[in-house]
Amino acid sequence: MRLTIGSRGSQLALWQANWVKDRLAALGYEAEIQVIRTTGDKMQGVPLTSAGAKGLFIKEIEEALIDHSIDLAVHSMKDLPTDQPEGLSVAAVPEREDPRDVLISRNGQLLRDLPATSRLGTSSLRRQAQVRSLGREFEIVPVRGNLDTRLRKLDRGDCDALILAAAGVHRLGLQNRITAYFAPEEMCPAVGQGALAIEVRLDDERTGQAVAPLDHRPTHLAVRAERATLHALGGGCQVPIAAYATLRGSELHLIGLVASVDGARIIRAAASGPKDDPENLGKRVARDLLAQGAQSILNSIP
């Protein structure tokens, strides 16, 4: 059985697709990677927050999956909208990489030591809002592109520090560039950060069975809880929303956050529940956030 894997063409996306390809090979399946350029790849000069659409990095890949041009798709989970096209399903979520955010500064300075005039590179409203909530009024410099591109921009002085997902830095073997890690309690990760989503057609049982051994149940349960929170809040990249779940014994523990873009308002919630009902846990945390006033923040976003 030969499988075709759909992937974006960035260095990190190809690393992820090749990781899946190698795991399938170990299970006895031949696979090839088909690179698909997505809308998000074509809009490198446009801030994601103003692009105005969900699924910018997966739309064309899902279309290829639906029309049978590919057999499976490998996505970064945080790029995958909570509403999937009819007929598609996440068949496997491999074990998560480090879900935390990291600081990479040009001079090796920690966040607290950076001068107030420092330029902080990030295109994430979630990161921007949480940094603002710490009382640091850095100049925020929008930075897009693959990891190498962002690091080059840092090194040439376009900004003084970057905030990035640890997972991508780890996967590309660039841990030596990391200045510091943010604990999830101080910088709550994006929904699904560090996890991969292997998406297949629901009617393709053979491919579903092929990728099933790659599923890591603790990660899959945690991600389901996080995505349930995001779905209940109806958020996208225009709103600073974060959620992070961990499995502790037989229970999932979930923290969630909604913030105003300027960081002036940060609403947090946390709850625990049975691991076999992650969606209900996610909805509970969303309801708590809304009860605390999150709706007014959500309504303030165009």
Image: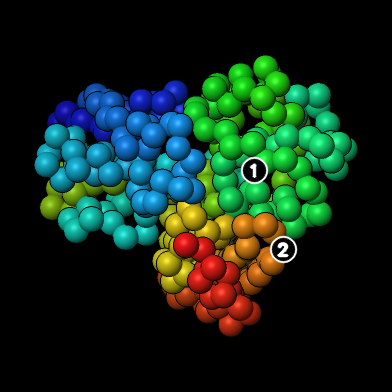
Q: Is residue 242 above or below residue 164?
A: below
Identify the residue under disc 2: 264
* 284 versus 208 height, above or below: below
Report the mark closest to the observer, 1 or 2.
2
Report whether residue 60 is seen: yes
| Marks 1 and 2, the one that precedes in the sequence | 1
Asked whether, in this view, residue 131 is left or right of residue 100, the answer is right
Element under label 2? loop
Residue type, mark 1 in image = Asp
Residue 180 percent across, percent down from the top left: 76, 37
Q: Residue 56 location, x and y as percent?
A: 36, 44
Q: Residues within 10 Å of mark 1 (few under 14, many from 20)?
A: many
Quarter-of-image position of residue 100: top right
Q: What is the number of callouts on the image? A: 2
* Residue at 81% from the left image edge and 54% from the top image edge: 135
Kind of residue indicated by mark 2 = Ala
Q: Nearer the viewer, residue 266 or 7?
A: 266
Residue drawn at (31%, 52%) of the image: 90
Q: Which residue is mark 1?
A: 101
